[in-house]
Amino acid sequence: MDFTCLTPDALDAVADPLRPVVEERLRVAPPGLGVDPGHPGPPEERVIYGTPYANHVETEHFTINWERGLAYGGGAERAGEALEAAWTYFVDEAGWTPPVSSDRYYLWVLLVDDLDGTGLTTEYYTEEYPEGYPVIFLNGSWAPDEPFWESLTIHEFHHTLQYAVRDYDGEGAVESWYWEASATWAASLVVPDSAAVDYIAPWYGDQADFAYLSTEGSHQYGMYVFNAWLDTDGVGPGTMQAAWDAGAVDQDADWRTLLERASGVPAATLWSGFAGAYGNDTYGRSAAWQDPVVVEIQAGGSWSGSADELGTVYYRATEPLVAEGHWTHGSDPSAATGSGPFGIADGPWTLAAGDTLALTTTTGTLCGWSLTTTSLDGDTGDTGEPEDSGDTGRADDSEAGEGEPQACACDRTGGGGLATSVWVAGWVWAQSRRRWPGGAPHAQRPSPPAAGT
């Protein structure tokens, strides 16, 4: 079993009371939750909103409960430590809005062993909290894997912060992808030295041509690498939080729009800057992050490809060459330059051996292109036959991928870098690619061990 957060299912259940659910706890609170104890707690102390389970432990802000006498090898205590660390980072230090009900009550956390996923965070409604109060469920089977358990716990807590500021509009992947991308990155913010979520990076890198909001193949979790870029070399610390702040103010705006507002950069140039940096390792990536799928190109060839909205195909030069793109449908945007660190680079592009060229669709769906290459001396050596396309042909389940192809625009972006006078996202690095030392990509997570007794 891989990381599977059921929060999007909970969001769907909350948005549509008639929607069938496979897990009743997505809609109906377990017994004992959400009942006013009928008496105030001690001054400046919280009380439990309901009746605690026979097995429970309280921290400053949370009540952690588990069923049937199951003991998770100290998992409850370690969950409490991770939750309090996340509270300190996000609420006390970064100023996120505290979860609903947390000013008076402990936040409910339930450790269960029959959850069809690794965790979920939902909200339930009472007269006291008609807007909903959050409850976290954690699959205790994962407690023995301490780094993963820590990251899972922080991930689910971050969903309680999201519920506090953003309503779910029932728009499926259009809305929910960024909930998951944000909660996954949250774990790395709280525990920056942990490699617990590094294995998720290929869920972007292996499917980089998918639409930015796709939820197919767990792509939405892999998009945490985009948030990592935003908060480090891309825009600066706090950019993800700024997007959520913008989302709190404008509940109807989609995440593409909100990220533009938070960063001050158009989405087309924002994503092309990320793609160029990711493809060429030009920001502080973890050593265990897997490179994206790349198409190796040589002088004298032709390749076809396509990507969905804000998706990217990566091409890596095996020798010095000049590459030029030809757009098979849709519009061809003019070059964008400006005073900021982003822009769109027009071809042709001169690539050194090892440089990666990232072609990113900026608008519409399934923008297509062909890429031709020549040697630096101008000799094409082209036989006229197209090479392996690098086009996966994968269908995307997101809304952006439905229907007939729309007009599109393709950013032609190379690696990250800074020019002195014109700042563009398509700077092709003439340097050797750099990587943090040590570590191979993580393998897929194994199945969880059986819960302890």
Image (cartoon, rainbow, N blue to C red):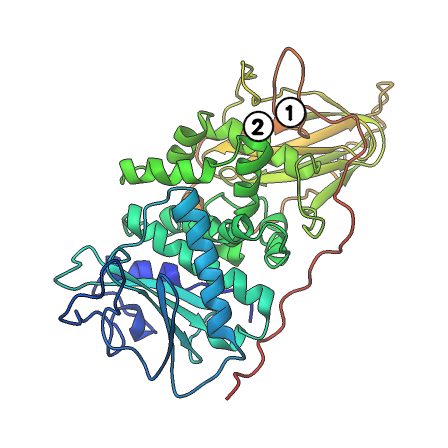
Picture coordinates of residue 453 (x, y %)?
A: 50, 89
215 or 199: nearer the viewer: 199
Residue 155 seen anywhere in this rendered image of the structure: no
Residue 127 in the image: above or below residue 274:
below
In which image quadrant can residue 53 be found? bottom left
107 or 427: nearer the viewer: 107
Picture coordinates of residue 276 (x, y %)?
A: 64, 33
Q: Residue at x 41, y 31 (%)?
A: 262
User: Mark on residue 116?
Assistant: none
Q: Which residue is mark 2?
A: 411
Q: Amino acid at mark 1?
A: Gly
Say whether residue 14 is left or right of residue 296: left
Q: Residue furthest top?
A: 421
Q: Earlier in the sequence, mark 1 or mark 2?
A: 2
154 or 103: nearer the viewer: 103
81 or 170: nearer the viewer: 81
In which image quadrant can residue 324 be found? top right
Residue 288 in the image: above or below residue 31:
above
Q: Which residue is mark 1?
A: 426
Picture coordinates of residue 200 (x, y %)?
A: 59, 56
Under tag 2, what secondary structure?
Answer: strand
Residue 78 seen anywhere in this rendered image of the structure: yes
Image marks 1 and 2: residues in contact by CB distance under 8 Å? yes
Picture coordinates of residue 123 (x, y %)?
A: 28, 62
Say whether residue 197 is left or right of residue 12: right
Q: Amino acid at mark 2?
A: Asp
Q: Residue furthest front?
A: 43
Rate crowding at label 1 as few (under 14), some (14 to 19) or many (20 or more) other CA atoms within 10 Å. many
Q: Which quarter of the rendering shows the N terminus?
A: bottom right
